[in-house]
Amino acid sequence: MRIRRRWLALLLVVLIASPVAAQRWRRWSPSPGTALPYDGRFTIVRLWYPYYPGWSYDWPDMEYNLSAILNEITAIRPNPNGSNILRMDDPELLKHPIAYLSEPGYWQPSEPEVEGLRTYLQKGGFLIVDDFHFPNEWAVFEMAMRRVIPDAHIERLDRSNPVFNTFFAIQSLDVPYPGYLGEQGLMGEFYGIYEDNDPAKRLMVVINFNMDIGDYMEHSAQGLYSVDPTNEAYKFGINYLVYGFTH
């Protein structure tokens, strides 16, 4: 109970502080396609893709709020000057252990982007895929992902998976999609791709389907969604980051 109260208190700090602080973050964040100079500190990287603006949804407030929580409850000290937005074929991507991809249901990468992301994953990068739902969006994502890793097995993950137990021990994967769809019963599903398709090896990609943890984190300052699923979204986010650092 003490840990739970501390977690809720920290979340309330973010809820109160986010509007003003996020304005500072936005002022210092790079424009799409540019990067903060690399200085060894952890910086959240969001992947850019062409033709559809979904790559940018929830930016930059999601990054600011998640970094604030990360800084408060872990020993990781993220870059306070903003977040990165990088192309998949940008060599700078290889300097960062974790990348975030939003709305992959509209992701149609070029061949250089496919090769760039494949190289990133093969060299140890960890990809978080978030914010898509419905079969047509899954089909677009799967087609693109199979170009990146042609022999990939996309496996459904259960609660015992290490990615859900790296920092927080997540008790349930039954988290509703934010907003109306969640109220109508749409629940998150979680998938992954292992290195060499071997569950004994590291998870290279974690996939949030029928889920949008970024939206929960973006709007935590406004109280748009209830506290419980918002809390869970932060737990997923922190666990993903810690897993990416340690695997």
Image: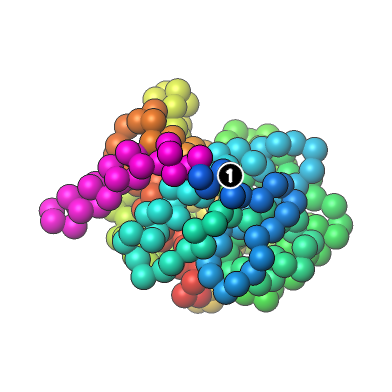
Of residues 119 and 78, the one drawn nearer to the viewer in this rendering: 78
Residue at 67%, 43% in the rendered image: 55
Residue 68 appears in the picture as rendered: yes
Q: How many marks?
A: 1
Q: Position of residue 215 (x, y in %)?
A: 49, 38
In this picture, residue 192 sits left or right of residue 5: right
Q: Is residue 112 above or below residue 226?
A: below
Tell me if 112 is positioned left or right of 204 in this view.
right
Residue 230 locus on image (x, y percent): 36, 40
Front residue of this view, candidates 209 and 62: 62
Left-right relation of 48 to 7: right
Q: Residue at x 35, y 30 (%)?
A: 223
Percent of width and height locating residue 154: 60, 57
| Residue 36: quarter of image | bottom right
Q: Which residue is mark 1?
A: 27
Q: Which residues are magenta?
A: 1-23
Q: Secondary structure at mark 1?
A: helix
| Image location (x, y in percent) of residue 108 | 79, 45
80 horizontally vs 9: left or right: right
Residue 21 in the magenta stretch? The answer is yes
Q: Give whichever of 232, 157 is nearer the camera.
A: 232
Color scheme of the displayed model: rainbow
Magenta part, dominant SS = helix
Q: Quadrant of residue 138?
A: top right
Residue 213 seen: no
